Amino acid sequence: MILPRFDVLVPGSIDEACAMLKQYAAKGVRILAGGTDLLVDLRRPIVPAEISTCGGCASHKSAGVRSTIDCGWWEGDSSPESDRALLTKVQDSNWKYPQYLISIHKIKELRGIEVDGKGNLRVAAMTTITDIERSDVIRENWTALAEGADFLGSPLVRNRGTIGGNIANARPAADSFIPSVALGGVLDIRSEKGSRKVAVDSFATGPGKTVLGKGEIITSIEFPAPPEFSGSAYYKLANRKSLEISNVGVAVWVALENPDGPVSDIRVALGAVGPTPILAESVKKVLIGKKADDANIKQAAKAARDDARPIDDHRGSAWYRSMMVELVTDRLIRLAVRRSGGEV
Amino acid sequence: LKKLITLTVNGVTHELAVEPRRTLLEVVREDLGLTGSKKGCGIGDCGACTMLVDGVATFSCLMLAIQADGCNVETVESLAENGKLNKLQQSFVDVGAIQCGYCTPGMLMMATELLRRNPHPEEKEIRLALSGNLCRCTGYQKIVEAIKAVAGE
């Protein structure tokens, strides 16, 4: 099946991209990064965000994800005939799917991994997942992010997919999103009006929905320097090793006061068990100020389970996911503590 | 609405006018007539369309031709040397790594990228590199063996 008709704009700078976002907002515009999600979604017009209505469909007047399947525009399995028919139908109707894609691949400042003098990490939005996976400095100091990159999609997806795109798509199981929440990532967001910073843990508002406003673009994500005696880990529980969406994904970041001492801070992020990645706040109450011993870790894992809000779907039942949140969180806290220099 | 792009494919530079919505795979197959790269799923699941874009293994079904403007593209047609199969291709034939053959161009390009990066990969590295390329004949074992045979030299 061919893609629907659209024009592609190729800005040379972030400012130019922001100007284009504003200029074409009324006609429907999306940012094209790696394309591993957007170009798939465009083959069926399931594209949310800048599209305000889905054209003549009474059931979808409100904002949100509009699926052609839900509206009855498209039914059953696809075939070239049905796809062509759909395409004609969509193009002949006043359906508003994006008419413009802004491909940001030529903006050099949107690519790269930098560590500043204070040891903080800045990953530009168009940095590919492969670049993150192969970065020694990330693997050593922000381990959960490198492990998230290991688990994401397949080598081919990682070669094209970007961290900015993975986060902007706001899927609750996104493998670079979950570790970014645990590691306390902060997004740098630009628009024509200027820039603002948003913590990754408060970026997503629902599946595919974010606080990103019209005309805004993610330019980078920053991670604080890891304190001494800290460590992190990510694990994705899934049926296959590659090209899979997790049943449960857990990222843990922990800091100890000293190798034998109590936990000074901990952040546990849960994926695929809620409408957005979840920062398990109750774990902090259980573990901060206490020693990371067997009993406390077990209790912390139970707290993470209570924070999860899984649903039943074809990947697993809510009950199974709850159990697995507890199990994986338990194991990962232990791993992160060992990586922090502690023993457990 | 067509846009002009420059594509270097297998060492030959082409100036092409393409519709923005067309993928690299469509342009290479339909406009340049290089039909070695296959379209399997069209949504980045199977890897049959794998090409090397500036040396990086890429789903050509999920890259717009416009995004490849100015890039150096290599397809499976670039592998043979002077009309003869290269070592990797010959190894696929010798080991019996080809059944229906549909995944083969993608497997070969993925293996080519791996062997350039790491001429002597271990078996688990080979399996990891191929983990996004599907063979629905499920002939993975022989594909891995064919690559191992070249990697061991």
Image: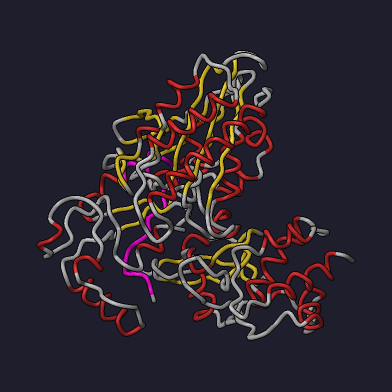
Task: Residue A115: give x, y in percent of width and height.
Answer: 60, 28
Q: Is residue B95 left or right of residue A259?
A: right
- Quadrant containing the C terminus of chain A is top right
**From where the camera sits, is residue A116 visible?**
yes
Task: Name which quarter of the figure residue A334 lies in.
Answer: top right
Task: Name which quarter of the figure residue A275 lies in.
Answer: top left
Point out the stretch of residues depicted in magenta: A2-19
On whether residue A16 falls in the magenta region, the answer is yes
Q: Is residue B153 left or right of residue A216?
A: right
Q: Outermost residue, right direction?
A: B153
Task: Residue A149: give x, y in percent of width and height.
Answer: 57, 46
Q: Is residue B129 shown above or below A259?
A: below
**From where the camera sits, is residue A107 visible?**
no
Task: Residue A31: give x, y in percent of width and height.
Answer: 37, 51
On whether residue B126 falls in the magenta region, the answer is no
Task: Name which quarter of the figure residue A66 lies in.
Answer: bottom left
Task: Residue A7: give x, y in percent of width and height.
Answer: 34, 62
User: Which residue is rendered at x = 51% and y = 38% of the image?
Assistant: A179
Instruction: Return the residue nearer the eye: B132 or A85.
Output: B132
